[in-house]
Image (cartoon, rainbow, N blue to C red):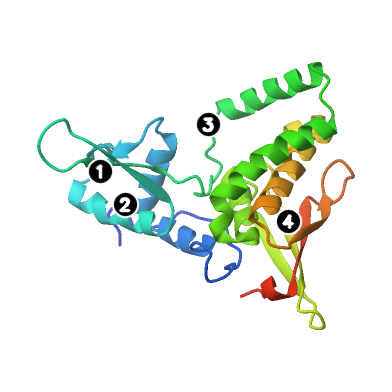
Amino acid sequence: MDELGASEPAVAAAGPRLGSDAPPPPLDLLKALGDNTRYAIYLELARSPRPLSTADIAEALGLHPNTVRPHLERMRDVGLLQVQSEARGGVGRPQHLYSLAPEAPSLGLEPASFPILARMLLRLAAASGADPVDATEVGREQGRADGERLRPRGCLGAVVGQLDAMGFDPALAVDDDPTTGAAAVTIAFAHCPFRDLAEQRPDLLCSIHRGLIEGVVEVAGEGEQIVGFGSLVDRSPCQVEIRVPGDDALAPT
C-alpha cells in the first residue's frame, strides 16, 4: 500500500518501445503513475503555474519531504519531470525545483484557457486569409524546432514523443517487408485535443498538424519518408504513415 491509499488510478494502455536509444516507453511512465503518491504529485505539478520544491509538494499533499523525495527521483528517472536548481540566497545547497517534462503525457490536464486561445487564434488566421499552405508551413517550422530537441530519440521516437506530449495518444503499428528489410509504420491518433476546432476548420488545423510531423521527420529522420496522412480533411482515419528504410526498420516488441 502506498502513502495515499491502496487503489490505483486508471491509466491508458501504452505503445511499444521504439529502440534501445529511445527514452523510457509510455508503459514505464504509466507504471510510475500507478502509484497514488506519484499520481498526486503529477496532478499537483500539472496544476501549478510554476515549478515546485520538494517542500512545496510535501506541504500540498500533507506528507513529509522525506516521503516525497524518492517519488520525485523515480518520476525524474523515467522522464516525467524536469529539474532545475535555485540558489537559496545564503549558505547551503541550492534547492531543486520540479516541473513536468515536455514529453510527459498530458492525461487531459491542459489548462482550460488553451481551447479558448486556440479558438481565437483560429479566427485570427481565418480573418487574415491564411490557407492550408500557410498553415502547413507554420506547423513545419515548429516541427523542425521540436525535431532538433527530440532528435536523440530517432525519427519514430521523436514523432511519437511529440504527439504524446501534445495529447494525441499515438498508437504505433509496424508492418515489416521481409524482402527489403524496410517497414511501413502507421501512427494512429487515438485522441485529438483540438477535435472541436478541427471539425470547424480542418483545412487549417489538420494542415498545421501535418506540417508539424513533416518538420519533425525532416530534422530527426535519416531516410524516413511520410507516405500518407489521414485527417478530417479527407474524412479518413487520423493517422500518419511513415516508411522506414531497411537498416532502421523496427519490429514491434
Say whether marks 1 and 4 touch (CB < 8 Å): no
Disc 1 packing (10 Å; few <14; some 14–19; many ≥20): some
Disc 4 packing (10 Å; few <14; some 14–19; many ≥20): many
Q: Which mark is residue 54?
A: 1
Q: In the rendered view, does 26 fall on the left or right side of 221?
A: left
Residue at image location 56% in from the left, 52% down from the top: 150
Give 12 or 76, whichever is nearer the viewer: 76
* Residue for badge 4: 188
Earlier in the chain: of badge 3 and badge 1, it is 1
The amino acid type of the residue labelled 4 equals Ala
Query: How far, Cα to Cα, is label 2 from label 3?
Result: 23 Å
* Residue for badge 2: 72
* Residue for badge 3: 111
Query: How far, Cα to Cα, is label 3 from label 1?
Result: 23 Å
Residue at image location 63% in from the left, 49% down from the top: 163
Residue at image location 67% in from the left, 59% down from the top: 171
Q: How many numbered badges does the structure rendering display?
A: 4
Specify the quadrant of the image occupied by residue 33: bottom left
- Percent coordinates x, y for residue 208 in the rendering: 74, 37
The amino acid type of the residue labelled 3 equals Pro
Say whether marks 4 and 3 touch (CB < 8 Å): no
